[in-house]
Image (spheres, rainbow, N blue to C red):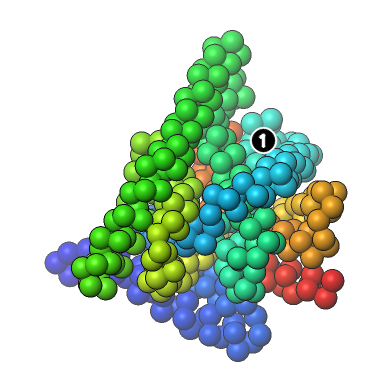
Amino acid sequence: MPHSVSLISTIAAGLGLALIFGFAAARLRLPAIVGYLLAGVIIGPFTPGFVADAGIASQLAEIGVMLLMFGVGLHFSLDDLLAVRKIAVPGAVVQMTVATALGMGLAHWWGWNLGGALVFGLSLSVASTVVLLRALESRGVLDSANGRIAVGWLVVEDLAMVLVLVLLPPLGSWLSGKTDAATDVNMLWKTLGLTLLQVGGFVALMLVVGRRFFPWVLWQVQHTGSRELFTLCVVAAAVSIAFGATVLFGVSFALGAFFVGMVMRESEFSHRAAEESLPLRDAFAVLFFVSVGMLFDPWVLLERPLQVLAVVGIIIVGKTLAAGLLVTAFRYPLNTALTVSASLAQIGEFSFILVGLGASLDLLPPEGQSLVLAGALISIALNPLVFKAVEPF
């Protein structure tokens, strides 16, 4: 062909195979997500035959994350976020600490250094935005009190991971012995202060300016009578502002899109905005799962089966128990504890970013990334079954 068609071939192969295997999984009474992940494995670089462009697939998946978090923001007001802060903030912090400690202990037992163990533990502590939202939506509990707690919990986790990703390079150079402790501590405090200032600036801008600007824009576009312009306005706001927030303020795409949706909720057309973006959210969510499957090397299951089993155990059992016990300790009902626990019993996009950064800083051993990816794929595939397991209780 006279020009590259990597984008077209990646979308065509990803969506086509996802449809086939998703349908087959549904007929076998398995979650459709299993089929989407398998489609990614088949077109990934670790299996023979056609290999899709992993870079393009990853970027398409990021768009899906933006649109999904934007949709959540449209149903999640600032009052909802503040209402769950007393459980979401301490819950997320304690649960991440427990999961990180479990991962670090396991890595230390395997003989990894402190830096690799820290990155490994942190990567197991944070849940996937896409998986959590799909699970809550499919059960119709996204707008419930339990759903708001789970989403608020996830927002706190995302904020924590933004800080981790920013602070890891200066901290990583000290962990690897490349700089002295005094120099590193000074750089660490400067970086922490700058990051908090950037995130605070973005949140303040969205709450002060965005709450007036975005509803006004939607009102103006609505009165043109053009459905295409309205849809374009919604998608452009979600993707463009999320990208700008990442470039200018250093927050994640997911958080940027979430706050855009949350301030746009002030508009009387917020329900229509949610409906217009729904088809795109579904399509790009499928591409997210395909992109996860593309990163997975099936050989790790044969080469390190016990290590993979231990990783999955931390994600599904360790995190679930930690979250459940904490929610119960705050005197919430059992069904709230079980819903939050099942929602968090998986890992995803932030884990991939973190292990990639850890590998680039020479902190994480080569097998670390494969183990995290194996844990992600298996936990995502099993997450619907975890929900079914807790439903009788």
The residue lying toward the viewer, choosing from 381 and 194, is 194
Q: Residues within 10 Å of mark 1 (few under 14, many from 20)?
A: many
Q: How far across and how far down the image is residue 375, in percent?
A: 66, 57
Looking at numbered disc 1 in the image, what kind of residue is underneath it?
A: Leu
Q: How far across and how far down the image is residue 294, in percent?
A: 49, 62
Q: How far across and how far down the image is residue 390, in percent?
A: 79, 70
Q: Residue at x 35, y 74 (%)?
A: 12
Q: Residue at x 74, y 68 (%)?
A: 386
Can residue 294 be seen in the rendering of this structure?
A: no
Task: Spot the residue most to the bottom.
Answer: 27
Residue at which label 1 appears: 118
Q: Residue at x 35, y 68 (%)?
A: 10
Task: Spot the residue most to the left.
Answer: 2
Image quarter hosting the C terminus = bottom right
Vertical arrangement, residue 169 with respect to residue 80, above or below? above
In the displayed structure, does residue 92 sit left or right of residue 185?
right
Image quarter hosting the N terminus = bottom left
Task: Spot the residue most to the top.
Answer: 182
Can residue 17 be seen in the rendering of this structure?
A: yes
Q: Quadrant of residue 113?
A: top right
Report helix, strand or loop for mark 1.
Answer: helix
Q: Quadrant of residue 298?
A: bottom right
